[in-house]
Protein backbone atom coordinates (compact mmCIF):
# COMPACT_ATOMS: atom_id res chain seq x y z
CA UNK A 1 0.00 0.00 0.00
CA UNK A 2 1.41 3.39 -1.01
CA UNK A 3 1.67 5.91 1.81
CA UNK A 4 2.34 9.63 1.65
CA UNK A 5 5.39 11.22 3.24
CA UNK A 6 3.45 12.75 6.15
CA UNK A 7 2.33 9.29 7.25
CA UNK A 8 5.97 8.21 7.62
CA UNK A 9 6.83 11.41 9.52
CA UNK A 10 3.91 10.81 11.89
CA UNK A 11 4.79 7.15 12.39
CA UNK A 12 8.44 7.78 13.20
CA UNK A 13 7.65 10.70 15.54
CA UNK A 14 5.20 8.54 17.52
CA UNK A 15 7.46 5.52 17.77
CA UNK A 16 8.41 4.62 21.34
CA UNK A 17 12.12 5.18 21.94
CA UNK A 18 12.48 7.78 19.17
CA UNK A 19 12.72 11.27 20.67
CA UNK A 20 13.69 14.53 18.98
CA UNK A 21 17.42 13.71 19.09
CA UNK A 22 16.99 10.13 17.83
CA UNK A 23 14.72 11.36 15.07
CA UNK A 24 17.34 13.88 14.01
CA UNK A 25 20.04 11.16 13.97
CA UNK A 26 17.88 8.85 11.84
CA UNK A 27 16.97 11.67 9.47
CA UNK A 28 20.62 12.61 9.12
CA UNK A 29 21.54 9.00 8.33
CA UNK A 30 18.75 8.16 5.87
CA UNK A 31 17.48 11.51 4.58
CA UNK A 32 13.75 10.78 4.96
CA UNK A 33 11.51 8.85 7.39
CA UNK A 34 10.30 6.42 4.67
CA UNK A 35 13.90 5.30 4.17
CA UNK A 36 14.21 4.66 7.90
CA UNK A 37 11.40 2.09 7.74
CA UNK A 38 12.99 0.50 4.65
CA UNK A 39 16.45 0.22 6.25
CA UNK A 40 17.95 -3.10 7.30
CA UNK A 41 18.62 -3.92 10.98
CA UNK A 42 22.35 -3.50 10.41
CA UNK A 43 21.89 -0.05 8.85
CA UNK A 44 19.68 1.04 11.75
CA UNK A 45 22.11 -0.23 14.39
CA UNK A 46 24.87 1.82 12.77
CA UNK A 47 23.05 5.07 13.68
CA UNK A 48 24.44 6.60 16.93
CA UNK A 49 21.99 6.32 19.80
CA UNK A 50 19.76 3.70 18.15
CA UNK A 51 19.74 0.55 20.24
CA UNK A 52 18.35 -2.96 19.59
CA UNK A 53 14.91 -2.23 21.10
CA UNK A 54 14.41 0.81 18.88
CA UNK A 55 15.59 -1.14 15.84
CA UNK A 56 13.02 -3.85 16.61
CA UNK A 57 10.21 -1.29 17.03
CA UNK A 58 11.04 0.32 13.68
CA UNK A 59 11.19 -3.02 11.87
CA UNK A 60 7.98 -4.32 13.48
CA UNK A 61 5.92 -1.12 13.20
CA UNK A 62 2.45 -1.77 11.77
CA UNK A 63 0.23 1.02 13.16
CA UNK A 64 -0.11 2.73 9.78
CA UNK A 65 -3.88 3.03 9.94
CA UNK A 66 -3.67 4.79 13.30
CA UNK A 67 -1.22 7.32 11.84
CA UNK A 68 -3.46 7.95 8.85
CA UNK A 69 -6.45 8.36 11.17
CA UNK A 70 -4.47 10.88 13.23
CA UNK A 71 -3.68 12.91 10.11
CA UNK A 72 -7.36 12.83 9.10
CA UNK A 73 -8.47 14.02 12.55
CA UNK A 74 -6.08 16.97 12.46
CA UNK A 75 -7.38 18.05 9.07
CA UNK A 76 -11.00 17.79 10.22
CA UNK A 77 -10.13 19.98 13.24
CA UNK A 78 -8.49 22.63 11.05
CA UNK A 79 -5.04 21.76 12.38
CA UNK A 80 -1.95 21.72 10.18
CA UNK A 81 0.78 19.11 10.62
CA UNK A 82 4.15 20.66 9.87
CA UNK A 83 7.18 18.38 9.57
CA UNK A 84 10.64 19.84 10.13
CA UNK A 85 11.53 19.15 6.51
CA UNK A 86 8.71 21.37 5.26
CA UNK A 87 9.80 24.76 3.78
CA UNK A 88 7.12 26.46 5.89
CA UNK A 89 8.52 25.04 9.14
CA UNK A 90 9.95 27.92 11.28
CA UNK A 91 13.63 28.28 10.37
CA UNK A 92 14.65 29.44 13.88
CA UNK A 93 13.15 26.29 15.38
CA UNK A 94 14.64 23.98 12.76
CA UNK A 95 18.12 25.17 13.74
CA UNK A 96 17.97 23.97 17.37
CA UNK A 97 19.63 20.69 18.35
CA UNK A 98 16.47 18.94 19.60
CA UNK A 99 14.06 20.33 17.03
CA UNK A 100 10.61 18.69 17.24
CA UNK A 101 10.11 16.55 14.12
CA UNK A 102 6.41 17.43 13.91
CA UNK A 103 4.36 20.44 14.94
CA UNK A 104 0.59 20.53 15.26
CA UNK A 105 -0.50 24.07 14.38
CA UNK A 106 -3.92 25.67 14.66
CA UNK A 107 -3.61 29.12 13.13
CA UNK A 108 -0.66 30.36 11.10
CA UNK A 109 3.13 30.42 11.46
CA UNK A 110 4.55 32.81 8.83
CA UNK A 111 8.27 32.38 8.23
CA UNK A 112 8.86 36.15 7.95
CA UNK A 113 7.92 37.46 11.38
CA UNK A 114 9.93 38.64 14.39
CA UNK A 115 9.06 36.78 17.61
CA UNK A 116 9.87 37.39 21.27
CA UNK A 117 9.02 34.95 24.07
CA UNK A 118 7.61 36.36 27.31
CA UNK A 119 7.40 33.99 30.28
CA UNK A 120 7.21 34.07 34.05
CA UNK A 121 5.60 32.82 37.22
CA UNK A 122 2.22 31.12 37.33
CA UNK A 123 1.68 32.98 40.62
CA UNK A 124 1.99 36.42 39.11
CA UNK A 125 1.61 39.51 41.25
CA UNK A 126 -0.63 42.40 40.14
CA UNK A 127 2.54 44.29 39.20
CA UNK A 128 3.82 41.33 37.18
CA UNK A 129 0.57 41.08 35.23
CA UNK A 130 0.52 44.82 34.65
CA UNK A 131 4.14 44.93 33.43
CA UNK A 132 3.58 41.93 31.17
CA UNK A 133 0.40 43.24 29.58
CA UNK A 134 1.95 46.65 28.97
CA UNK A 135 5.15 45.26 27.50
CA UNK A 136 3.38 42.74 25.25
CA UNK A 137 0.88 45.30 24.03
CA UNK A 138 3.75 47.56 23.02
CA UNK A 139 5.57 44.67 21.32
CA UNK A 140 2.39 43.93 19.38
CA UNK A 141 2.05 47.58 18.37
CA UNK A 142 5.62 47.36 17.04
CA UNK A 143 4.72 44.32 14.95
CA UNK A 144 6.60 41.81 17.12
CA UNK A 145 4.85 38.48 17.74
CA UNK A 146 4.60 37.43 21.39
CA UNK A 147 5.32 33.75 22.17
CA UNK A 148 4.37 32.17 25.50
CA UNK A 149 2.96 28.98 27.00
CA UNK A 150 -0.69 29.81 27.82
CA UNK A 151 -0.10 28.88 31.47
CA UNK A 152 -1.62 30.75 34.38
CA UNK A 153 -0.09 34.04 35.49
CA UNK A 154 2.51 35.77 33.34
CA UNK A 155 1.88 33.59 30.26
CA UNK A 156 -1.81 34.49 30.28
CA UNK A 157 -1.00 38.19 30.69
CA UNK A 158 1.47 37.97 27.78
CA UNK A 159 -1.15 36.63 25.37
CA UNK A 160 -3.75 39.11 26.63
CA UNK A 161 -1.35 42.02 26.21
CA UNK A 162 -0.49 41.07 22.62
CA UNK A 163 -4.16 40.64 21.73
CA UNK A 164 -5.04 44.00 23.28
CA UNK A 165 -2.46 45.55 20.95
CA UNK A 166 -4.19 43.83 18.03
CA UNK A 167 -1.06 41.83 17.38
CA UNK A 168 -0.19 38.20 16.80
CA UNK A 169 0.62 35.78 19.59
CA UNK A 170 1.72 32.13 19.65
CA UNK A 171 0.92 29.70 22.46
CA UNK A 172 3.11 26.60 22.77
CA UNK A 173 1.21 23.89 24.65
CA UNK A 174 2.31 21.00 26.82
CA UNK A 175 -0.64 18.89 25.69
CA UNK A 176 -2.63 18.15 22.55
CA UNK A 177 -4.15 21.21 20.86
CA UNK A 178 -7.63 19.79 21.46
CA UNK A 179 -7.04 19.60 25.24
CA UNK A 180 -7.77 22.90 27.00
CA UNK A 181 -5.34 23.51 29.85
CA UNK A 182 -5.63 25.28 32.19
CA UNK A 183 -9.44 25.16 31.87
CA UNK A 184 -9.91 28.85 32.70
CA UNK A 185 -7.93 29.80 29.59
CA UNK A 186 -10.46 28.21 27.28
CA UNK A 187 -11.56 31.73 26.31
CA UNK A 188 -8.05 32.44 24.99
CA UNK A 189 -7.80 29.39 22.72
CA UNK A 190 -9.93 30.73 19.84
CA UNK A 191 -8.50 34.25 20.24
CA UNK A 192 -4.89 33.01 19.98
CA UNK A 193 -5.67 30.63 17.10
CA UNK A 194 -7.42 33.45 15.23
CA UNK A 195 -4.64 35.98 15.83
CA UNK A 196 -1.55 33.79 15.72
CA UNK A 197 -1.27 30.09 16.47
CA UNK A 198 -1.70 27.31 18.98
CA UNK A 199 1.33 25.02 18.65
CA UNK A 200 2.16 21.60 20.10
CA UNK A 201 4.51 18.72 19.36
CA UNK A 202 2.05 16.32 21.01
CA UNK A 203 -0.67 14.35 19.19
CA UNK A 204 -4.35 15.16 19.64
CA UNK A 205 -5.73 13.98 22.95
CA UNK A 206 -2.38 14.13 24.79
CA UNK A 207 -2.98 15.07 28.42
CA UNK A 208 -1.00 17.87 30.12
CA UNK A 209 1.53 15.69 31.94
CA UNK A 210 4.16 17.43 34.11
CA UNK A 211 7.06 16.12 31.99
CA UNK A 212 5.69 17.81 28.88
CA UNK A 213 6.08 21.39 30.12
CA UNK A 214 9.86 21.57 30.53
CA UNK A 215 10.18 19.98 27.07
CA UNK A 216 7.82 22.48 25.42
CA UNK A 217 9.95 25.34 26.80
CA UNK A 218 12.65 24.60 24.22
CA UNK A 219 10.06 25.32 21.51
CA UNK A 220 9.04 28.60 23.13
CA UNK A 221 12.64 29.83 23.06
CA UNK A 222 13.42 28.10 19.76
CA UNK A 223 10.68 30.02 17.94
CA UNK A 224 11.95 33.34 19.28
CA UNK A 225 14.78 35.82 18.87
CA UNK A 226 14.92 36.26 22.63
CA UNK A 227 13.21 35.44 25.92
CA UNK A 228 11.85 38.01 28.39
CA UNK A 229 11.32 36.86 31.99
CA UNK A 230 8.95 39.07 33.97
CA UNK A 231 8.63 37.32 37.33
CA UNK A 232 10.39 34.15 38.46
CA UNK A 233 11.31 32.59 41.76
CA UNK A 234 14.70 31.01 42.33
CA UNK A 235 13.42 27.61 41.11
CA UNK A 236 10.91 28.82 38.55
CA UNK A 237 10.19 26.75 35.46
CA UNK A 238 10.79 29.94 33.47
CA UNK A 239 14.49 29.53 34.20
CA UNK A 240 14.37 26.28 32.20
CA UNK A 241 13.28 28.36 29.21
CA UNK A 242 16.22 30.68 29.85
CA UNK A 243 18.62 27.72 29.88
CA UNK A 244 17.27 26.58 26.53
CA UNK A 245 17.52 30.13 25.20
CA UNK A 246 21.20 30.36 26.16
CA UNK A 247 21.93 26.96 24.58
CA UNK A 248 20.18 28.12 21.41
CA UNK A 249 22.04 31.43 21.27
CA UNK A 250 18.97 33.56 21.97
CA UNK A 251 18.91 36.91 23.80
CA UNK A 252 17.81 36.87 27.45
CA UNK A 253 15.96 39.77 29.07
CA UNK A 254 14.58 40.30 32.57
CA UNK A 255 12.12 42.79 34.06
CA UNK A 256 13.15 43.93 37.56
CA UNK A 257 10.70 43.77 40.45
CA UNK A 258 10.50 44.66 44.13
CA UNK A 259 13.67 43.79 46.05
CA UNK A 260 11.70 42.04 48.80
CA UNK A 261 9.43 39.96 46.54
CA UNK A 262 10.05 36.22 46.14
CA UNK A 263 8.99 36.53 42.49
CA UNK A 264 11.88 38.91 41.84
CA UNK A 265 14.68 36.62 42.97
CA UNK A 266 14.95 34.70 39.72
CA UNK A 267 14.76 37.77 37.50
CA UNK A 268 17.26 39.71 39.61
CA UNK A 269 19.64 36.75 39.49
CA UNK A 270 19.36 36.76 35.70
CA UNK A 271 20.21 40.47 35.61
CA UNK A 272 23.23 39.88 37.85
CA UNK A 273 24.33 37.11 35.50
CA UNK A 274 24.16 39.35 32.44
CA UNK A 275 20.55 39.36 31.22
CA UNK A 276 19.45 42.66 29.66
CA UNK A 277 17.40 44.71 32.11
CA UNK A 278 14.06 45.72 30.58
CA UNK A 279 12.31 48.95 31.53
CA UNK A 280 10.44 49.48 28.26
CA UNK A 281 9.98 47.92 24.84
CA UNK A 282 12.95 49.77 23.35
CA UNK A 283 15.31 47.81 25.62
CA UNK A 284 14.20 44.68 23.74
CA UNK A 285 14.07 46.15 20.25
CA UNK A 286 17.59 47.59 20.34
CA UNK A 287 18.98 44.12 21.06
CA UNK A 288 17.00 42.17 18.46
CA UNK A 289 17.30 44.60 15.54
CA UNK A 290 20.77 43.30 14.52
CA UNK A 291 19.40 39.73 14.65
CA UNK A 292 16.36 40.26 12.45
CA UNK A 293 18.38 39.09 9.44
CA UNK A 294 15.99 38.10 6.69
CA UNK A 295 12.93 39.29 8.58
CA UNK A 296 11.50 42.11 6.45
CA UNK A 297 11.32 45.65 7.80
CA UNK A 298 7.53 45.41 7.78
CA UNK A 299 7.74 42.78 10.54
CA UNK A 300 8.64 45.55 12.99
CA UNK A 301 6.67 48.73 12.52
CA UNK A 302 6.89 52.10 14.28
CA UNK A 303 4.63 52.36 17.30
CA UNK A 304 1.73 54.71 16.61
CA UNK A 305 1.73 57.85 18.68
CA UNK A 306 -0.77 57.90 21.49
CA UNK A 307 -3.91 59.81 20.56
CA UNK A 308 -4.82 62.28 23.23
CA UNK A 309 -8.47 63.26 23.56
CA UNK A 310 -9.48 66.68 22.25
CA UNK A 311 -9.24 69.59 24.64
CA UNK A 312 -12.01 69.47 27.20
CA UNK A 313 -12.75 65.78 26.59
CA UNK A 314 -11.98 63.59 29.58
CA UNK A 315 -12.45 59.89 30.25
CA UNK A 316 -15.54 59.07 32.27
CA UNK A 317 -16.49 56.27 34.64
CA UNK A 318 -13.70 54.22 36.24
CA UNK A 319 -10.99 55.72 34.02
CA UNK A 320 -12.05 59.23 34.96
CA UNK A 321 -12.10 58.32 38.65
CA UNK A 322 -8.54 57.00 38.45
CA UNK A 323 -7.32 60.09 36.60
CA UNK A 324 -8.87 62.36 39.21
CA UNK A 325 -7.14 60.39 41.97
CA UNK A 326 -3.76 60.59 40.22
CA UNK A 327 -4.13 64.29 39.43
CA UNK A 328 -3.61 64.95 43.14
CA UNK A 329 -0.22 63.21 43.09
CA UNK A 330 1.49 59.83 42.69
CA UNK A 331 -0.24 56.80 44.21
CA UNK A 332 0.54 53.10 44.52
CA UNK A 333 -1.61 50.43 42.92
CA UNK A 334 -3.24 49.21 46.14
CA UNK A 335 -4.11 52.76 47.15
CA UNK A 336 -5.69 53.47 43.77
CA UNK A 337 -7.72 50.25 43.94
CA UNK A 338 -8.97 51.01 47.47
CA UNK A 339 -9.87 54.62 46.70
CA UNK A 340 -11.61 53.74 43.43
CA UNK A 341 -13.44 50.74 44.89
CA UNK A 342 -12.05 48.37 42.23
CA UNK A 343 -10.00 45.18 42.38
CA UNK A 344 -6.29 45.40 41.57
CA UNK A 345 -6.57 43.48 38.28
CA UNK A 346 -9.22 45.86 36.92
CA UNK A 347 -7.14 48.86 37.98
CA UNK A 348 -4.11 47.40 36.16
CA UNK A 349 -6.13 47.03 32.97
CA UNK A 350 -7.33 50.62 33.19
CA UNK A 351 -3.84 51.94 34.01
CA UNK A 352 -2.42 50.11 31.00
CA UNK A 353 -5.05 51.68 28.76
CA UNK A 354 -4.47 55.15 30.22
CA UNK A 355 -0.69 54.84 29.98
CA UNK A 356 -0.83 53.82 26.33
CA UNK A 357 -3.20 56.73 25.70
CA UNK A 358 -0.59 59.05 27.18
CA UNK A 359 -2.68 60.03 30.22
CA UNK A 360 -0.73 58.25 32.98
CA UNK A 361 2.96 57.71 33.76
CA UNK A 362 4.48 54.97 35.89
CA UNK A 363 7.10 56.13 38.38
CA UNK A 364 9.74 54.11 40.26
CA UNK A 365 8.35 52.07 43.14
CA UNK A 366 5.23 51.00 41.19
CA UNK A 367 3.61 54.41 41.63
CA UNK A 368 1.46 56.12 39.03
CA UNK A 369 0.66 59.75 38.32
CA UNK A 370 -1.52 61.60 35.80
CA UNK A 371 0.33 63.41 33.02
CA UNK A 372 -0.06 67.17 32.81
Image (cartoon, grey):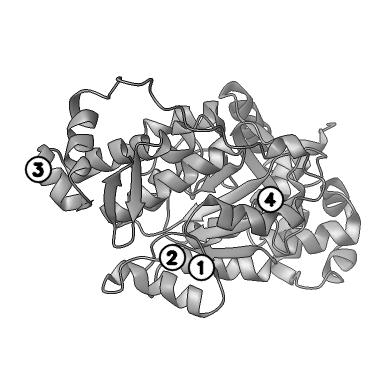
Q: Of helix, strand and loop, which one carries label 4?
A: helix
State the residue position of label 2.
237
Going from N to C along the chain, the mark reached first, 4 or 1, is 4
Q: Of helix, strand and loop, which one carries label 2?
A: loop
Near mark 1 (Cα within 10 A), the count class, few <14, some 14-19 or many ≥20, is some
The image quadrant of residue 197 is top right
Near mark 4 (Cα within 10 A), the count class, few <14, some 14-19 or many ≥20, is many
Q: Of helix, strand and loop, which one carries label 3?
A: helix
Going from N to C along the chain, the mark reached first, 4 or 2, is 4
- Residue 269 x %, y %: 45, 77
Going from N to C along the chain, the mark reached first, 1 or 3, is 1
Q: Are marks 1 and 3 in contact (CB under 8 Å)?
A: no
**Quadrant placement of the C terminus:** top left
* 68 over 271 or under it: above or below: above
Q: Nearer the viewer, mark 1 or mark 3?
A: 3
State the residue position of label 4.
13
* Disc 2 to disc 1, C-alpha distance: 5 Å
In the image, taking residue 17 as reference, residue 350 lies left or right, namely left
Residue at 47%, 56% in the rendered image: 119
Amino acid sequence: MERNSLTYWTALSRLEGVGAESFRALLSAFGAPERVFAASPGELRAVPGIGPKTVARIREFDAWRECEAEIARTREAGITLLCSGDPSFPQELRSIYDCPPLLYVKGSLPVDEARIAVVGSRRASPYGRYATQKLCRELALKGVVVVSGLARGIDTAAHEGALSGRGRTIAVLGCGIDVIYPPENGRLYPAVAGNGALVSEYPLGTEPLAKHFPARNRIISGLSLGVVVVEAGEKSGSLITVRYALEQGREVFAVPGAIDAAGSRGTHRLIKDGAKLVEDVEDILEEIRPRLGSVPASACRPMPEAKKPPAGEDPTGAEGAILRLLAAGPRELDGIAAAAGLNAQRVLELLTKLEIAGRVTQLPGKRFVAKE
